[in-house]
């Protein structure tokens, strides 16, 4: 049981750090879009932002999955 608790804590801590990094990138990308589009609150900027972030997330997830498979 002790090993399982440590593994779960490690997974939760990793997820927490991932969330903090994602939030930092979120603010950075929003600032970039605000600079490019003039305002990050316009529907067009929000749509482009959502699409770009989704595409990056999909490619990152695929790459991580492939790396995990190679590691096995």
Image (spheres, rainbow, N blue to C red):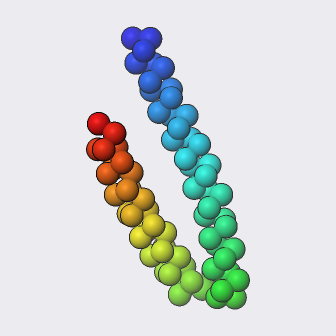
Residue 46 appears in the figure: yes
57 or 64: which is nearer to us?
Answer: 64
Q: Quadrant of the C terminus?
A: top left
Taking 32 as reference, is 61 left or right? left
Residue 45 in percent (x, y) is at: 57, 83
> What residue is drawn where x is 61% and y is 56%?
23
> With respect to residue 23, does 33 lie above or below?
below
At horizontal 50% and vertical 29% (from top left) the residue drawn is 10
Question: Residue 62: image x %, image y %?
Answer: 34, 57
Q: Can you name the residue that lies furthest to the front here? A: 70
Q: Quadrant of the N terminus?
A: top left
| Relative side of 22 to 53, left or right | right
In-front residue for pair 23/68: 68
Residue 58 to residue 9: above or below: below
The residue nearer to you, when weighing 70 against 65, is 70
Task: Locate residue 28, reporting x and y percent.
Answer: 67, 67
The answer to which quarter of the image holds residue 8 is top left
Residue at the image position 50 percent from the left and 34 percent from the top: 12
Left or right of 56 on screen, residue 67 = left
Furthest residue toward top? 1
Q: Is residue 50 left or right of residue 35?
A: left
């Amino acid at each position: 049981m002790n090993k399982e608790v440590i593994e779960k804590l490690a997974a939760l801590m990793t997820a927490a750090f991932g969330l903090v990094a994602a939030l930092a990138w979120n603010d950075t990308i929003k600032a970039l879009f605000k600079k490019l589009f003039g305002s990050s609150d316009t529907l067009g900027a929000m749509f482009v932002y959502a699409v770009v972030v989704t595409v990056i997330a999909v490619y990152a997830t695929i790459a991580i999955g492939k790396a995990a498979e190679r590691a096995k």
